[in-house]
Amino acid sequence: MIEVITDIEEMNRLSREKRSEGARICLVPTMGALHEGHLSLVRIALEKADFIVVSIFVNPTQFGQQEDIDIYPRDLKSDTEKLYSLGAHVVFAPGSSSMYPKGYSTFVSVEGLSEGLCGRSRPVHFRGVTTVVNKLFVIVNPHIAVFGRKDAQQLAVIRRMTEDLNMDIEITGGPIIREEDGLAMSSRNSYLNEQERKQAAVIYRSLCAAETLVKSGVKTSDNIISKVRNILEETAMAKIEYIDIVDVDSMKSVDDISGSALLAVAVWFGKTRLIDNVILTV
Ligand code: PAF
């Protein structure tokens, strides 16, 4: 059996009970519409802990006013079935009004790290993420939490928050899971029409070309970014929002790669914004 809990107090009580019994608790925060990428994070959780809580909450504070919260895919029943067959123990699916009751006015914000890359076009996004993740950490009180590396900036921001606020929680990153043609799995892929979906595979092709370039000895960010841009621009429907090469911890742009750096992109296909990244190592 998998338990579905919507009540914050009940979730908190159960976590406290499990902790007192000596269980190691792992939280996998999600917004639902679970795909293989999410499920791979749950598998990591199952290896690391013995009580697995998967939160499903489409968090309003991380969406800007013009963004897709109203159409964001939701399917609690199918998500719960998938989690049950994997062996997760609890689905925590609180309502918006219990997470953010009337008068709610407290936000957690990680400065600097949240401002570049996705933060440029989504100014309230990371503040919403860190606020809700903080709340989930307080409610579930996990020993470990697992996040996907597709959202590399989110992972860096959450690591920073956890360290800065002295939270005793191990943050683990799970690998990007891809479709057969290389497109990174994302709940937002379901917005793509047939043509957009086909063309979206160019994102991964451009990242692979960057890897090949780096392997051939190129270390200058400008040259690598030009290559990625040229490949993306060959695809009619791809509209580039950003291509950047940044330090993996500070998320600050680097001119040259020494050691390793993160190549991150955001590309629009019609009304759908997709992000992806790869670590480049010299
Ligand atoms: O990555 C996500 O799905 C969300 O940003 C998260 C971490 C669940 C917070 O709402």
Image (cartoon, rainbow, N blue to C red):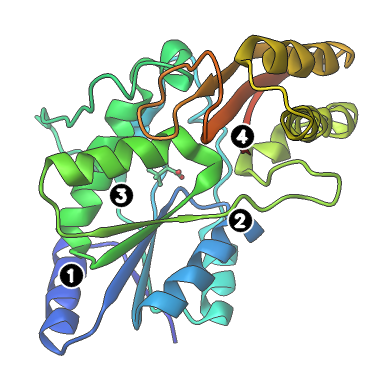
Cα–Cα gap, marks 2 and 1: 28 Å
* Residue position for label 3: 95
94 to 266, vertically: above or below: below
* Residue position for label 2: 37
Cα–Cα gap, marks 4 and 1: 38 Å
Cα–Cα gap, marks 1 and 3: 13 Å
Circle nearer the viewer, 2 or 4: 4
245 to 277, vertically: above or below: above
Q: Is residue 42 visible?
A: yes
Amino acid type, label 3: Gly
Q: Secondary structure at mark 1?
A: helix
Residue at (40, 36) in percent of width and height: 154
- Indicate which disc residue 277 carries: 4
Amino acid type, label 4: Asn
The quadrant of the rendered image in which ligand 1 is seen is top left
* Mark 4 crowd level (few <14, some 14–19, many ≥20, 10 Å Cα): many
